[in-house]
Image (spheres, helix red, strand yellow):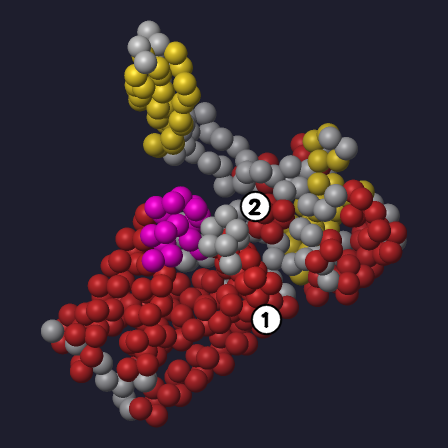
C-alpha cells in the first residue's frame, strides 16, 4: 500500500502542478473559459462573469499549490480534502459539459493540451480514483525532510505564483501555446491540406410511412423511402481536420480584406476585442506608437468586434488616423491577451506581439 500511495502521490502532485502552471502563464485565457462556463447557455451563472479573472487566478494558484503541498507533505489533511472536493466538483462539471455537449474544451491544460469533453471527464475519474487511494494510504504521506522545509517550499511556491501571475497580466503570457504566437504565419495556419480527413455525419431521417413514424439513419445519400419526410437530425460522428487558425477575417463595410492585409510587408494592427472594455491608458499608449509607425511607412489598422458606431467615438477621442475593421471577438481574445494589444506582421508572419504596457517596445 505504501508503494501504491507514493506512486499516486507523485502522479496527482505532478499533474496538478503541470495543469496549474500552464494556466497560470495565461490566466486571462482561463478566465475566458470560465466565462464560457458561467454563460447562460451552460451553467447560467452570469453574475459570476465579471469576476472570472479573479476566480481563475484563485483556482490556478490553489491548484498548483495543492500539487506542491502534496509532494512535500505539507498540511496533509487540508491538502487531501481540498484535492478531493476540487476533483469531485470538476468531475461533475466535466460530465455535465460532455453529456450535454456544452463546452467542447474544458481548458484544464489551457491551450497547451486539448482534450475532448469525454476525455476530460475520464481524466478526472482517474484522478478521483488516485485521490481516494491517497486517502486510504494517508498515513504514508509524510513531510519531506521536515515540517519546516515543507512549509518553506509551500510558501515560496505561493509567492512565486503571485509574482508570475502579476507579471503575465501586466505583460503577456511567458509561454504562448496558441497558433498566433510570434513566428507563425497566419495564412499558412489557415490552410487545409488536400489529404485532410473530412468530417463524417450521421443523418436521422424521419418519415411518415402509412401513418407511422419511421426513422432511418444514414451517413450518405438521401434514403429511398415511400413516405413523407418529416425532418432530419444531423450528428457529427467523426470530426474532420480543423486548421490551427480558423474564423480569422478582417472585414469592413461588408468586404473581406484578409488576403490583402496578409500580403502587407509592414503591417501594424491594434487589437481590441471590445473597445468599451479597453484600457484608457492602453489606447493612449497605442496612439503614440502608431503615430510613429505611420510616419515610418507602416500600414496601421485596428481589428475589433465593436461596431463602427461604437468605434467612431474612440477614433475621435484618441485621434486614431487609421481604419477600424471587424473580426470575431473570440478570435481577437485568442490572438493577444491584452485589450488593447499590438501585432506586427510581415506578409502574414507575426513578428512581434505586445501588451499595451509594452507598446513603446514596438520595433519600427
Can you see residue 304? yes
Q: For the point 77% across and 63% down, which residue is it? A: 280
Q: The residue tagged with tag 1: helix, strand or loop?
A: helix
Is residue 89 shown in magenta? no
Quadrant housing the N terminus: bottom left
Which portion, as a residue range, is magenta? 92-107
Residue 305 % position (x, y) = 68, 45
Which residue matches tag 1?
167
Few, some or many residues within 10 Å of mark 2 (<14, 14–19, 20+): some
Q: To which residue does mark 2 refer?
A: 184
Please give the name of the residue rendered at 35% of the width and 9% of the height, measured from the top-left corner: 227
| The one of 296 and 14 positioned closer to us in this rendering | 14
Quadrant where the C terminus sits is bottom right
Name the residue rendered at 73%, 62% in the picture: 279
* Mark positioned earlier in the residue sequence (1 or 2): 1
Vertical placement of residue 213 versus 154, above or below: above
Residue 145, located in which quarter of the rendered image?
Answer: bottom left
Q: Position of residue 353 (x, y in %)?
A: 65, 55
Amino acid at each position: 500500500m505504501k508503494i501504491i500511495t507514493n506512486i499516486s502521490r507523485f502522479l496527482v502532485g505532478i499533474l496538478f502542478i503541470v495543469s496549474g502552471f500552464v494556466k497560470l502563464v495565461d490566466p486571462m485565457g482561463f478566465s475566458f473559459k470560465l466565462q464560457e462556463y458561467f454563460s447562460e447557455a451552460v451553467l447560467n451563472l452570469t453574475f459570476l462573469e465579471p469576476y472570472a479573472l479573479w476566480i481563475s487566478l484563485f483556482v490556478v494558484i490553489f491548484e498548483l499549490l495543492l500539487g506542491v503541498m502534496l509532494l512535500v507533505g505539507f498540511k496533509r489533511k487540508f491538502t487531501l480534502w481540498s484535492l478531493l472536493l476540487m476533483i469531485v466538483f470538476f468531475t461533475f462539471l466535466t460530465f455535465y459539459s460532455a453529456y450535454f455537449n456544452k463546452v467542447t474544451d474544458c481548458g484544464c491544460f489551457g491551450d497547451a493540451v486539448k482534450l475532448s469533453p469525454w476525455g476530460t471527464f475520464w481524466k478526472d475519474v482517474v484522478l478521483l480514483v488516485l485521490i481516494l487511494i491517497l486517502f486510504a494510504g494517508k498515513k504514508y504521506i509524510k513531510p519531506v525532510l521536515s515540517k519546516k522545509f515543507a512549509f518553506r517550499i509551500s510558501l515560496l511556491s505561493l509567492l512565486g505564483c503571485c509574482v508570475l501571475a502579476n507579471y503575465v497580466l501586466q505583460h503577456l503570457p511567458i509561454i504562448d501555446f496558441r497558433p498566433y504566437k510570434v513566428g507563425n504565419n497566419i495564412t499558412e495556419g489557415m490552410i487545409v491540406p488536400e489529404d485532410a480527413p473530412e468530417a463524417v455525419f450521421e443523418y436521422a431521417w424521419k418519415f411518415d410511412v402509412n401513418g407511422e413514424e419511421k426513422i432511418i439513419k444514414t451517413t450518405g445519400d438521401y434514403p429511398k423511402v415511400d413516405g413523407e419526410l418529416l425532418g432530419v437530425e444531423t450528428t457529427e460522428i467523426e470530426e474532420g481536420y480543423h486548421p490551427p487558425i480558423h474564423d480569422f477575417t478582417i472585414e469592413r463595410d461588408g468586404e473581406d480584406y484578409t488576403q490583402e492585409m496578409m500580403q502587407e510587408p509592414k503591417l501594424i494592427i491594434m487589437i481590441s476585442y471590445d473597445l468599451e472594455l479597453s484600457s484608457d491608458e492602453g489606447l493612449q499608449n497605442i496612439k503614440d506608437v502608431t503615430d510613429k509607425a505611420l510616419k515610418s511607412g507602416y500600414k496601421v489598422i485596428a481589428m475589433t468586434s465593436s461596431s463602427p458606431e461604437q468605434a467612431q467615438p474612440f477614433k475621435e477621442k484618441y485621434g486614431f488616423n487609421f481604419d477600424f475593421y471587424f473580426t470575431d471577438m473570440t478570435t481577437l481574445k485568442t490572438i493577444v491577451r491584452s485589450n488593447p494589444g499590438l501585432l506586427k506582421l510581415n506578409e502574414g508572419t507575426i513578428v512581434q506581439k505586445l501588451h499595451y504596457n509594452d507598446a513603446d517596445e514596438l520595433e519600427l
